[in-house]
Every structure is written in structure tokens, then in C-alpha cells.
Image (cartoon, rainbow, N blue to C red):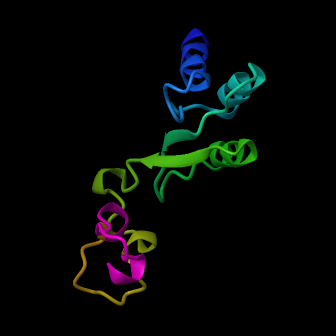
Amino acid sequence: MSSWRALATLHSDGRVRAIGVSNFLPEHLDRIVDLGGVVSAVNQIKLHPALQQREIEAANQRLGIATRAWSPLARAAVLTDPAVTGIDGGTRPHRRPGRPPLSPPAGPHTTPAHW
């Protein structure tokens, strides 16, 4: 918890805008909230169609913490999963599965419909 306190101090001093955690379970999140002060802005967890982590996502939502996925395509293991292949609604059959969530275009007027 000393590391979290150090990060919270940096946040309260204005030296960082936000702090986050990785792979924190609900009980870990509750411990840092019980310390008082700043709450994590994000909890990065392994999350993909075959590994939903609903308990962690629920805790993140309850505490106002954004969930960020790492390995969202399970190292390509889920590229044939209908949840992934159907992301664009089948409107762009030339797109490779997984491309829309991984490489949105840059620019001020781009939306998922333009991918």
C-alpha cells in the first residue's frame, strides 16, 4: 500500500492527472478506496470474449473505475469468435477480424461507422 500512497501523493500534489492499477481484484480495489483520497482512474485487466471477468468489471463500475482490457483478442485466439467477426455487422467483409477494435483511424471526424 505504500506504493499506492506515493502515487496518491503525486496526484494530490498535481504532478500527475490520474493514477491507475493493473489486475486488481475487487478486494484490492476496496483496500485502496478504504485508504481514502484518490480512487484509481483505471483498472487494466485481461479481458476478451472468452474471459469476461464480470466480477472485476462490476467492482470497477461500482467504484467509478474505468476497465481497460489487455489482450482483448486473446493473442489472436478469438479471431474466429462470432463476437469478434461480427463487430462491424458484416458490412465490411474485406476487413480482417479484430481490426476495428485495434486500429481506429486518427482524425477529428472519424467514428466506428467510418472504419
Examine the rendered structure and indicate whether residue 86 appears above or below residue 50.
below
Give x and y (percent) for residue 90: 37, 87
Q: Does residue 52 show up?
A: yes
Dominant SS type (magenta): loop
Q: Nearer the viewer, residue 76 or 27?
A: 27
Q: Height in image: 100 above or below 89?
A: above
Whether residue 110 is in magenta: the answer is yes
In the rendered structure, the answer to whether residue 78 lies left or right of residue 33 reads: left
Residue at 31% x, 70% y is: 107
Residue 96: give x, y in percent of width and height: 24, 73
In the drawing, does residue 10 fall left or right of residue 114? right
Give the camera-side residue of 69 and 78.
Answer: 69
Which residue appears at 22% of the width and 84% of the height? 94
User: Quick one: 9 or 52, which is closer to the camera?
Assistant: 9
Report x, y in % for residue 61.
69, 49
Q: Is residue 22 visible?
A: no
State whether residue 76 is above or below residue 69.
Answer: below
On the image, which quarter does residue 112 sit in?
bottom left
Viewer-proximal residue among 43 and 74: 43
Q: Which residues are magenta?
A: 100-115
Q: Quadrant of residue 3?
A: top right
